[in-house]
Amino acid sequence: MAHIALTISGSDSGGGAGIQADLKSMSALGVYGASVITAVTAQNTRAVTAVHSIPLDVIEAQIEAVLSDLDVRAMPSWRPMRWAHCGRS
C-alpha cells in the first residue's frame, strides 16, 4: 500500500476545500488518504450556507477506527482543529 496520511477536517459539498480538497491533493501525490470528518457543510464557490458540527464522540471514534487499522505516517498541519466546532469550547 502507498504511504498513508490522515486529514481531519470538514466536508465541503462543493468539493473545493476541506476533506475533499485534501484527499484530491493526497491522491495526486500518490498518497493513500484517510479522513476524519469534523463538520458537514453546504457550500459552493460563493458561500457557505450551512454547517453541521459532528459530535466529539463520533470524531474520536473515527480517529480510533483509522489509527487502529492503518499505518498513518502523516497528517496535514495547516488547519488546527477548532474545539468549539466539536462541542467543546
Image (cartoon, rainbow, N blue to C red):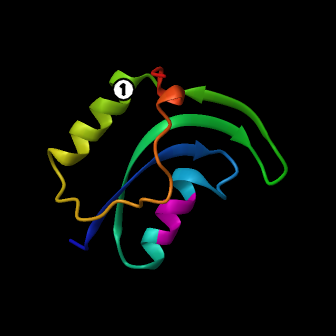
Q: Position of residue 70 (x, y in %)?
A: 19, 54
Q: Quadrant of residue 51?
A: top right
User: What's the magenta region?
Assistant: 21-25
Q: Position of residue 84 (x, y in %)?
A: 52, 27
Between residue 75 and residue 44, name the one nearer to us. Answer: 75
For the image, the number of numbered tags is: 1
In this rendering, is residue 71 above or below 89?
Answer: below
For mark 1, give the secondary structure.
helix
Residue on which disc 1 sits: 58
Callout 1 amino acid = Val
What residue is at 20 percent from the left and 71 percent from the top? 1
Question: Does residue 47 belong to the magenta stretch?
Answer: no
Question: Does residue 24 belong to the magenta stretch?
Answer: yes
Q: Residue furthest front?
A: 89
What residue is at 46 percent from the left and 42 percent from the top? 81
What residue is at 66 percent from the left and 58 percent from the top? 16
Q: Residue furthest right?
A: 46
What residue is at 82 percent from the left and 44 percent from the top? 47
- Lateral position of residue 32 relative to residue 23, left or right: left
Q: Position of residue 10 (x, y in %)?
A: 54, 42
